[in-house]
Amino acid sequence: MIVMFTLVPLLGIPLQYGGYFESLQGAFRRYVYTNNRFYLLVSLMSAFIGVLVNMGVVPLVHQISMASNKSSNKKLLSLAISRGFTTCSIWAPTTPAIALIVQLTGAKWSLFFPYGILFGMIAGLIGYTMVMLEGRRVENSYTTVVDTAATTEKLKPVAEINLRKVIELSVFSIALISLIGIVSLITGISAVIVVSIASLVSPVIWLASIRRLPVLLREFKGDYFNERLPRLKNEIVLFVGAGLFATSISYSHLGNYVPHILNLIVGSNALSLSVVIIFGSLILSVLGVHPIITVTILGGTVNTTAYGVTPTYMALILAISWSMGISISPSGGRANIMT
């Protein structure tokens, strides 16, 4: 997993230097002139880009969204980015949480993926519906009074939409996810290993195909070592600690108490187990307990066969708990970045 953490940031190099930002900013300038459209496009972009760059999605999408005057509404912008990234953190194999959950539960990502992306789409739809209902209930609730001259000065001219670049970005991103799933399914290799290999190989193929391969070498020697890797130190320490924590629980008597307590609360009912895990994780997250602690304990101690569920089902429940908990936890890195 540490290897995966260090290699995944390489996927952000083609995204950042492939000439895609200008086209995406052009889409904002031309088509986004309502709050609903702004929220929808920002959340979709956060989900899409988040698969490639994880938490780096916040500054990138924020930079792109500046092309729209709706970006002056900080509440709407933060909601769209946070909820959008939440949808991909439920299923994307390039996110550390899913890598950890798959390892803990023993689930196969290729079997987990269809259900994960379905729940990700449901989460995105619920978020969009909430924005629409709030907009209807309180007219102009997101409207902000902004000085016209200042806004004009802030929104610098951007290039027109390059449809070829938008299609190019979509093709490479979809091909990457599809390749990970197919290789993992056919070979039986862990998704964590496949993601690590893809993160190393894909940027080379991507930039070579658009004739910008020298950029990869330049950024690998410069920004990747000087900026991207140092920013990962907290995340690496966090997940290494989680791994040690899970191992210590499995070798201690503490691991026997968690399933016992769950049995007293839910018996052998799978639905009750799901409700207790999700809502229990949310309550602990609000109280400041990082979701990685809850996920590590449950994923490392609960025997899925005792409740008549598969490892895939357990992985899905933990992924939902993680994505919701990290959005509201004051100890989560996402909250710190958003502020």
Image (cartoon, rainbow, N blue to C red):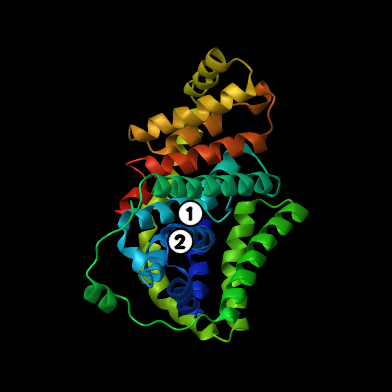
Is the residue marked by circle 1 packed among few (<14), some (14-19), or many (20+) residues within 10 Å? Answer: many
Residue annotated with mark 2: 42
Query: Which amino acid lies under the numbered mark 1 shown in the image of this protein?
Result: Gly
Seen in the image, is 181 located left or right of residue 10? right
Query: Which amino acid lies under the numbered mark 2 shown in the image of this protein?
Result: Val
Residue at image point 68% right, 28% down? 309
Residue at image point 62% right, 26% down? 303
Q: Residue 306 at what x, y percent from top left?
A: 66, 21
**Residues at discs 2 and 1 in contact (Cβ within 8 Å):** yes
Residue annotated with mark 1: 84
Q: How far separated are the C-alphas under marks 2 and 1?
A: 7 Å
Seen in the image, is 273 located left or right of residue 70? right
User: Quick one: SS at disc 1?
Assistant: helix
Seen in the image, is 176 located left or right of residue 147? right
Residue at image point 38% right, 35% down? 285
Residue, far right: 186
Residue 307 falls in which quadrant of the image? Answer: top right
Residue 13 shows in the view: yes
Q: Residue 119 at what x, y percent from top left?
A: 60, 44
Q: 240 or 98, which is in the foreground? A: 98
Q: Residue 182 at what x, y percent from top left?
A: 73, 58
Residue at image point 70% right, 52% down? 189
Q: Residue 186 at what x, y percent from top left?
A: 77, 55
